[in-house]
Image (cartoon, rainbow, N blue to C red):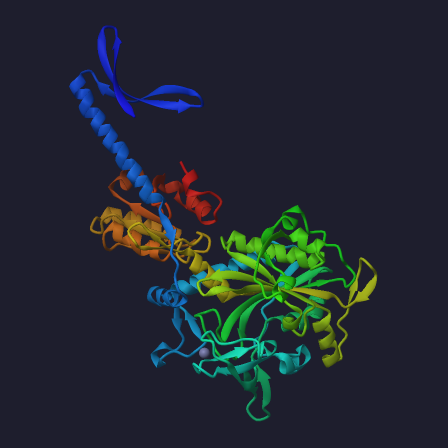
Amino acid sequence: MAYIVKQKVNGKDYYYLRKSVREGDKVLSKNLAYLGKTREEAEIKAKEFLKNMENEKVEEKKISKLVQEKISVEELANFCKSKGFVFRSSDIYGGYSGFWDFGPLGSELFNNLKQNWWNHFVQQKENMVGIDASIISHPRTWKASGHLTSFKDIAVICKKCKRSTKLDPNEIGKVKCDCGGEYESQGEFNLLFKTSVGALDKDEAYLRGETAQSMFMDFKLISQTSRVHLPFGIAQIGRCFRNEIAPRDFLFRSREFHIGEFEFFIHPEEKKCDLLDENHLNVKFNFLSEEIQQKNSEELEEIFIKNLVEMNKLGEWHAYWLAEQIIWFRNLGLDEIKIREHTKEELSHYSSATFDIDYTYPFGSKEVAGNANRGQYDLNQHIKESKQKMEIFDEKTNQKVIPRVIEPTFGMERVFLALLTKAYCKNEKGDVVLKLSPNIAPVKVAVFPLVKNDEKLVNLSREIFDNLKKEWNIVYDGSGSVGRRYARNDEIGTPFCITIDGDSIKNKDVTIRDRDTTKQIRVKVSELKEILRKLINCEIKFENLK
Ligand SMILES: [Zn+2]
């Protein structure tokens, strides 16, 4: 509690507001404010001071409250449509199931996400190169890869509610509909989209169902033309097509989507991974093992990457890349993940060990990424089908070898969906605030002139805007109250708003307002770009700015 004290200095009275503060086992008194020379004056000033302090406290509480909002996938789809993130494809024709358009904000956000992935897995790695291959490749690709014979789902219809869906072959007879009804098989369907190439001598061709095959087919060329040596990886992000029987859950299961993946080629006898360090071994996560799943349980255990290696669940290179995947998700702020080991029955035709990385979506914990040990399967298949030699010379061992392959895969739309799910928050007023990381957010900065009829102010605002937009995707917002402009930008995740007011012209400074705390600081116009660069690249936090 604060109290008023009188102090006599040279025979004169001075009043102070004082407070007792406990420090360890001592009680100290601390002056909060000087209150003047008379008791009456002191009482008025003390009241004012305490009221202000109270207001500040309330203000601070308001600031710190940004609560993540549980949102259904339908609500998220509506939100994405209303703000221009994602639309149904061909909306004027009633949409087309399984296809989506990224709108102005969605394409910015998606590009930022893809760039972030590329930066982490390609540019920051010494042993990785990127490619961008064609979507349609020689039809024999898919014969060699096994997709023509093995890339199948069983279409089923629920006998009770008539809902159609797909099952993996190993789920037939084991899985029931959510309504409790039995499924009736409608036969097998290949997931590859067919098309024809050429006008007269038509070739039956396929839209790629995964990006991996071009990395295998280009492997020899890349090893001859790039300065790479084993072990090295080839990465790409690209569109894929799967003729899903039942597209659902918004972007989660669609017929056209992006995969980000890489094939990492290793000498077949190389067991040690010299990049696997303490940081990787100590990555901790929730794990669902094969043994637990065989007992029909979904109980998670918290373990480290090093435990998986000790248990012989995976080799060192496999462990390294699984850890790198988890690290990337955590960098994006996506902590709600678990690792699920594939059971023997569900392993793909090409894999000897596979792990799913599942994210906790509103509609359940579902696969957002995967990590498969493909061994030498794909290269051997292409050697068989093409009759080409694909082994390469390894200088370290003086051997010609066919490398084995580890393949980390990411469903890029699924990561996009996870980012939005995680970012969707509400503030105390109940307004949506999209808490996206500044380096991912579609719009980085909004520039506001405080009033729109002041020519000098508008000129300075335009000047600042023109300078900043050379660097980032930013917006100029001159209409409506400042509060309304903040709200509009909070809703689409703009991390920083710049306000230019009357003092800006005199003092050559502006206000930066932080989306998550709503706190504001004033900075010099000359320093603005550099400060924003650090904030947007997440090199400094807003709270740590002076
Ligand atoms: Zn049913």
Q: Quadrant of ligand 1?
A: bottom left
Residue 492 horizontal/vertical position (percent): 36, 58
- Left/right placement of residue 474 relative to residue 415 reads left
Quadrant (top left/top right/bottom left/bottom right) for the N terminus? top left
- Front in this rendered view, residue 391 or 318: 318
The correct choice, above or below, for 271 with respect to 221 in the image is above
Residue 333 horizontal/vertical position (percent): 49, 53
The correct choice, above or below, for 143 with respect to 455 in the image is below
- Left/right placement of residue 333 relative to residue 280 reads left
Residue at image location 18% in from the left, 16% down from the top: 38
Residue 250 falls in which quadrant of the image?
Answer: bottom left
Residue 479 falls in which quadrant of the image?
Answer: bottom left
Residue at image location 40% in from the left, 57% down from the top: 473
Q: How many numbered circles are shown?
A: 0
Residue 315 horizontal/vertical position (percent): 71, 58
Res 321 seen here: yes
- Left/right placement of residue 132 relative to residue 76 reads right
Residue at image location 54% in from the left, 59% down from the top: 117
Residue 194 falls in which quadrant of the image?
Answer: bottom right
Res 373 seen here: no
The correct choice, above or below, for 45 with respect to 76 in the image is above
Residue 319 horizontal/vertical position (percent): 67, 56
- Front in this rendered view, residue 206 or 29: 29
The correct choice, above or below, for 301 with respect to 84 in the image is above
